[in-house]
Image (cartoon, helix red, strand yellow):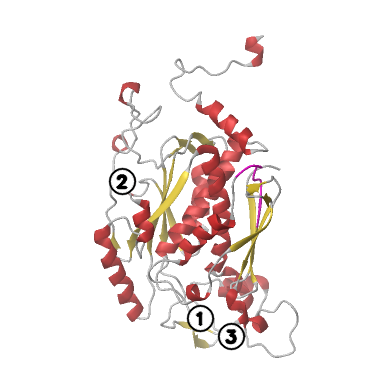
Amino acid sequence: MTGFRWLTAGESHGKGLVAVVEGMPAGVPLSADEIAADLARRQQGYGRGKRQQIEQDRAEIMSGVRHGLTIGSPIALTLINRDFENQGWNVRMATEPVDQDVERVTLLRPGHADLAGTQKYGFDDVRPILERSSARETAARVAVGAVARALIRAVAGIEVHSHTLQIGSVRADVPGRIDWAAVDASPVRVADRAAEQPMIDEVDRIKEALDTIGGVFEVRATNVPFGLGSHVHWDRKLDGQLAQAIVSINAVKGVEIGDGISNVELPGSEVQDVILPADAWERKKWERASNRAGGLEAGMTNGQDIVVRGFIKPIATVPRRLPTADLLTGEEATAFYERSDVAVVPAAGVIGEAMVAIVLAGALIEKFGGDHLAEMRRNFEAFEATVGPREATPPEPAPEARA
């Protein structure tokens, strides 16, 4: 079996999180410091809760790397939950039986996995469901994403970034060229400086009202080659894989690729990305007049930047406790509340980067697979040499044709 495969394990207040990554070729530079940089970015962002002040996430590389280079075997990562030793979590989330009563959580929270999960698994306590469904799991995803990012950068020079487009009713204007360092320095990770303070004010307003707020983040992948993904089967279409990856992030309820939403209001003649003739090309072979398709056509990358957006609902852990029912009795109650964030859009963008990098890593392995980075690079460079007008760069003849 080939491809970039990964799994995470762990609960929000358990001992920690674990991730296993399989499919990385040998020879890719990878360090714990690189992974830690992305984990730190995930913990930032205006509107984050107190949990981020407790945890200082760092993934320890347990296997699959030697002397700073991957060795082709599965990579195992562990992230310790510092909160496990605080406030009795080492009892409530102990893996061994305990000799004392542990209070059950039975006040169901609307918008969470609580009700569906307890009915599916037969629990009379919400705790086993909420612990795994918590967004804490995304720390492990970001660690996996950092591994994927190392691969796609080393093979094809692909870079993945994100920024905040909207928080609540405040929407940013996107500049023609985004300063990604300035985005990461912004408390709300926005590229439009004029929108920064209004977004902060919006978060403050919602926090004072004991509520939460959603928004939109955008992920962009640059230096993406032609031909990742495929048009031949539904599950090999890269846009479908990216959409699933983004909507799998906690609280994301919608995905847009390119200008997919605004395009519905326009005639077809105005939404296609016109292919420019060779004498108009500036940076690379095959250029377009626009990128409304977000770098994907018919399930394949078309040489332009990938642009994908995630739409986040206001998170469901609302400080203003909502009406609900009790899991055990069905009687009217007030929802259970545990500390939470107010706005997660800035952090969700970083998680979105990880998910996009993971999908692209799998697509690169499928297209240019090899057991060592050098082999993948050769395959990539050989393919790149064929990109262009067919008569200018004819494909290599088949063996029977040469014979």
Q: CA distance from mark 3 to mark 2?
A: 47 Å
Q: Is residue 61 depicted above or below 369 in this figure? A: below
**Quarter assignment of residue 197:** bottom left
Query: Quarter of the image containing the C terminus?
Result: top right
Say which of marks 3 and 1 sits in front. Answer: 3
Query: Quarter of the image containing the N terminus?
Result: top right
316 left or right of 383 in image: left
* Magenta stretch: helix, strand or loop mostly: loop
Identify which amino acid the numbered label 2 is placed on: Arg
Residue of label 1:
338
Residue at image x 75%, y 82%?
97
Residue of label 2:
177
Q: Is residue 298 visible?
A: no
Identify which amino acid the numbered label 3 is placed on: Gln
Where residue 399 appears, as percent x and y from the top left, is: 66, 15
**Viewer-proximal residue among 176 and 255:** 176
Q: CA distance from mark 2 to mark 1?
A: 40 Å
Mark with earlier residue (3, 2)? 3
Residue bounds of the magenta highlight: 20-28
Residue of label 3:
87
